[in-house]
Amino acid sequence: MAAIFQYVLAGLTLCGIGFYLIALWSARHFLRAGRPPLGFAPPVSILKPLRGSDPAQLHAFESHCQQEYTGEYELIFGVADASDAAVANVEALRRQFPERRIELVVCPEVLGTNRKVSSLVQMLPRARFEHVLINDSDIRVEPDYLARVMRHFADEKVGMVTALYRPVPGRTLGSRLEALGISTEFMAGVLTARFLEKGVHFALGSTLAFTRQALAAIGGLETLVDYLADDFELGARISAAGYRVELADSVVENHIPDYSFDEFMAHQLRWGRSTRSSRPLGYTGLALTFGLFWAMLGVVPAWYVGRGGRWALALLAAAAVLRVAVALAVGLPVLRDRYVLRDLWLLPLRDVLAFVIWVGSYTGSRIHWRGEDFVLEKGKIRLA
């Protein structure tokens, strides 16, 4: 049995090595992809739903007001409660940038279990322009962000543009592990999906830019008020409606909270169950991507059986080298993540925990989100 287990682990390791090679090619393909020239700059309404405040929030808001964009744009913030702590940052932003059109909308109606989408439904009527861009409250952008995102809409077949994001970890181990996973695992998966599926057929909450025409084709934001992964659903539905979804070459930035280890695991478990519900087949296939984990595990039966140790160590070395190569290829030239090199030594721990989280995501459908407990069913959430 130990020998059979050894062969199975070797096969899984080889699958993981194959994934790493494809991920490396996918990163290269993204960097070399042709993109439309800068210049098309339609008016755009930026919608930012808010809930609570953090020390980096105002800085993130400021980056949206410092755009080198030739077109017109407006910022519309939304809160469910006028007493929300984020309101003070919006007011400070107004004083700092009086030349910008900045509006605050109070969204008291609860239209579904996803309160963020509920706010967005109430914010959208205040938007003046045909092109709309939604991103999270903690997203910081570069001065050429709008120019690089909106240029894709020069092609009328494009219905949505999304973007990768670069995590900025906090001081805790949980925060650093989450950031490392985003840069070297999640983003590598996004680029690989883009390459294998010959395009992007989903979207990331870091940037959801779309036309009203594309939104109308899927029935509006109202159809998403009970979905947890609203960003994924929005991109998937716009793609299914016949529009093209593009991945911009602008990388935005978000700060990862100082999660305790337990908070990190809970957040990752919620993320895993959400992804499993949204992309069940793809999520099951993640089992074939844990190359370094399978290689580390494969050394155990080789030692127990007393043969095949050299092959097991050779596979471990190959998997480790390629895992590091993927981390560097995605983390440095694609994301320009200055923390990847510092935290490379955490990769084995991160990959072991990734497997534990993957298994754990199949053990139930309950999630904890924004202080409440929900049950997740086919992408939708309901109060537990």
Image (cartoon, grey):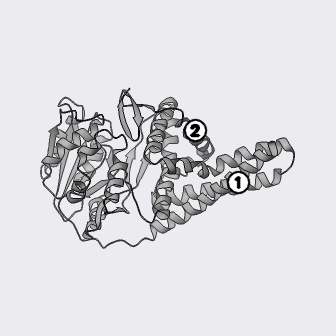
> What residue do we see at 48% from left, 48% from top?
182
Instruction: Tell me whether circle 1 and circle 2 mark residues in contact (CB < 8 Å).
Output: no
Question: Which of the 4 image quarters holds residue 121?
Answer: top left
Choose the circle earlier in sequence order: 1 or 2: 1
Name the image quarter holding the N terminus: top right
Q: Which residue is mark 1?
A: 11
Of the pair 77 and 341, the residue shown nearer to us: 77
Q: CA distance from mark 1 to mark 2?
A: 19 Å
- Tell me the SS state at disc 1: helix
Dividing the image into 4 quarters, which one contains the C terminus? top left
Query: Residue 138: image x %, image y %?
Result: 33, 43
Q: The disc labelled 2 sits on which kind of residue?
A: Val
Q: Which mark is residue 359?
A: 2
- Find numbered disc 2 in the image and state the secondary structure of the residue it sits on: helix
* Few, some or many residues within 10 Å of mark 1 (<14, 14–19, 20+): some
Horizontal side of 356 relative to 128 (left or right) equals right
Residue 240 located left or right of residue 359: left
Residue 31: numbered disc: none
Asked where in the image residue 93 lies, by quadrant, the reply is top left
Q: State the residue at coordinates (51%, 29%).
A: 262
Q: Nearer the viewer, residue 315 or 338?
A: 315
Give the image location of residue 9, x and y in percent. Answer: 72, 48
Up the image or down, 36 lies above or below 52; here it is below
- Residue 172 in view here: no
Residue 130 in view in this figure: yes
